[in-house]
Amino acid sequence: MAETFIIIPGRTSRQGAGISEGKFKQNYQDEITQLQVAPEDMQRLNLQPGDWVRVSSESGQIEVQIKPAKGGELPPGLLFIAYGDLSSRLMGADTHGSGMPTSKGFDVEMVALPDYKPTPAT
Amino acid sequence: MATAETSPPPVSEEIKVIQDATCTFCGCVCDDIDLKVQGHKIIEAKRACVLGTAWFLGHEIEDRPMCLIRGQEASVAEGIERASQILTEAKYPLIYGMSDTTVESQRVAVGIGDWIGGLVDTTTSVCHGPSGMAFQGVGEVTCSLGEVRNRGDLIIFWGANPAESHPRHFTKYSLMPKGMFVPRGRKDRTCVVVDVRKTKSAKAADIFVQIKPRKDFEALWTLRALANGVDLDPEEVERETGQPFTVWTDLMDRMKAARFGVIFFGMGLTMTRGKHANTEALMALTRDMNKHTRFVCKANRGHGNVSGADNVVTWRTGYPFGVNLARGYPRFNPGEYTATDVLARKEADAAMIIAADPMANFSQPAREHLKSIPYIAFDPKETPTTRAAEVAFTVATYGINVPGTVYRMDDVPIPLRPAFDSPNPSDLSILNGIEKRVRELKAAEVN
Ligand code: SF4
């Protein structure tokens, strides 16, 4: 069943280094395609590292693998993903007259995809 | 620097050392990096952080054509011609990006925007644009990073995570340095991090205040009320901010007791609901604190020369970003003339993207529209944006191959000391070519 979370896309040092190494290279692609979930939420929802989930916002949806947030970084109810193609897909186009779409701290729904098989990248 | 017309210089394999090179990966713009360079490769970047090391050592001259038109190899001259046609034929062209290039290139790009009567917007609109709007509303009490280094004894990071985004911020400017009035360095400073996540920066702080997501505005106004002696209901404060009232009174006591307080703020404020209202609250709080002691604030700017982009667009048009030059004079209106809006609303009919990657960073409707219009892209590397461009130029990298000036996040101009020549042209040489050709085409329209 889908549950509502708040997602924070943001910079990580690995994502930042990946920009310089090349956006089509493994390091960057790995970093921007992993969703961090609070360990308490993973336990409650019976999720394991590497499981696939679908995350949907008002504006888009993504399928993504999860990993536990380290060192108490996320309180339960909060998700984190490094900035990139996937995080931008969830962002709405409306900037509320500011030029800036709401790109952090918006509501998403997350649902586990136990049988999900990603289509290989072309 | 190679130009569009010259052939690549011969490559020497001798190791050379470039002292005090400037890293332009982030807004810290560290200008104390010693580089060891062999041929077209940087093999060591002394003093660079993890991001700076990747920036320098990951720099490769990619084996890609200098110019592609619709994916087919073309000469730079053909690219300049096609780009000029696209820009002059368009009714509502957009020039966007510019935060990862020199002020010299930014200046020419804005000039082209003026000649074609287009929109000029920079990546500021999707990073600290809301701070720019707040600045116009309440002003900004601020200072240089040198003052923070020498005076700052209470350093607050709000919605910013420099440990991952500006890794040398702590050591070079804000926490560790022994300064004139903080002679024991870190021991003379108190560090507070306010954030919704317990980030890596939070772990470096003396005090971490974890607030409820989307409650920055309420937390900042709580502090404003305390700074101004306004009574508050402790229960309501805790319910709204997620932290007991005593946490805020304790923080305010420390802020009042500081000799030189500094708030660095990040995109945790500008990208979250409230946006410019959040940053306006923070700037107003900084102003309020000056009734008690010396207090300043400073946006932690991301890209190496995004501050330069604000400066150049401001001194050329009077406004920092989101400027419409279609009527022959500048108009500023974020939300109306900003890049993501004009693309998502399908208004722009051509674009020139300089050193930015909207095809990865913009909302889906904006990306879809950009893909459907002819646009020109400049980047040293292949990106989703260069892949979908009608004209894509592979350019030399600023700071590594190209000299010029960039503005550090505190608006201090810093010169670049390039490591080696690139066989690829600078964006400046191409932009100069486009400006010249655009002027010819515009003159022909009149005659
Ligand atoms: S802190 Fe920023 S400017 Fe300094 S070396 Fe690191 S990435 Fe470069």
Image (cartoon, rainbow, N blue to C red):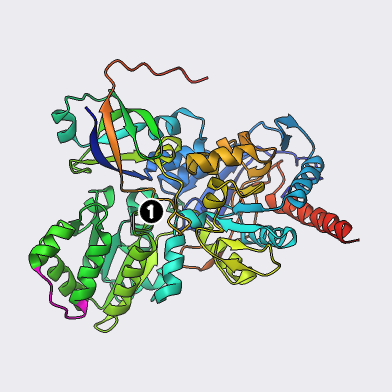
Kind of residue at badge 1: Met
Q: Where is residue B223 in the image (x, y as percent from the top left)?
A: 21, 71
Could you say which is closer to the camera, residue B267 or residue B65? B267
Give the labeled residue for mark 1.
B271
Q: Magenta stretch: residue B226 in it?
A: no
Residue at coordinates 31% horizontally, 67% vertically from top-left? B263
State whether residue A62 appears in this view. Answer: yes
Q: Main secondary structure of the magenta part?
A: loop
Q: How many marks?
A: 1
Residue at coordinates 51% horizontally, 61% vertically from top-left? B334
Q: Would you say the beta carbon of the disc 1 residue lies within 8 angstroms of ligand 1? A: no
Q: Magenta stretch: residue B228 in it?
A: yes
Residue B106 falls in image quadrant: bottom right
Drawn side of residue B295 relative to residue B390, left or right:
left
Drawn side of residue B424 relative to residue B101, left or right:
right
Q: What element carries label 1?
A: loop
In the displayed structure, B253 sits above or below B177; it is below
Q: Residues within 10 Å of mark 1 (few under 14, many from 20)?
A: many
Q: What stretch is highlighted in magenta?
A: B227-233
Q: Which chain carries label 1?
A: B
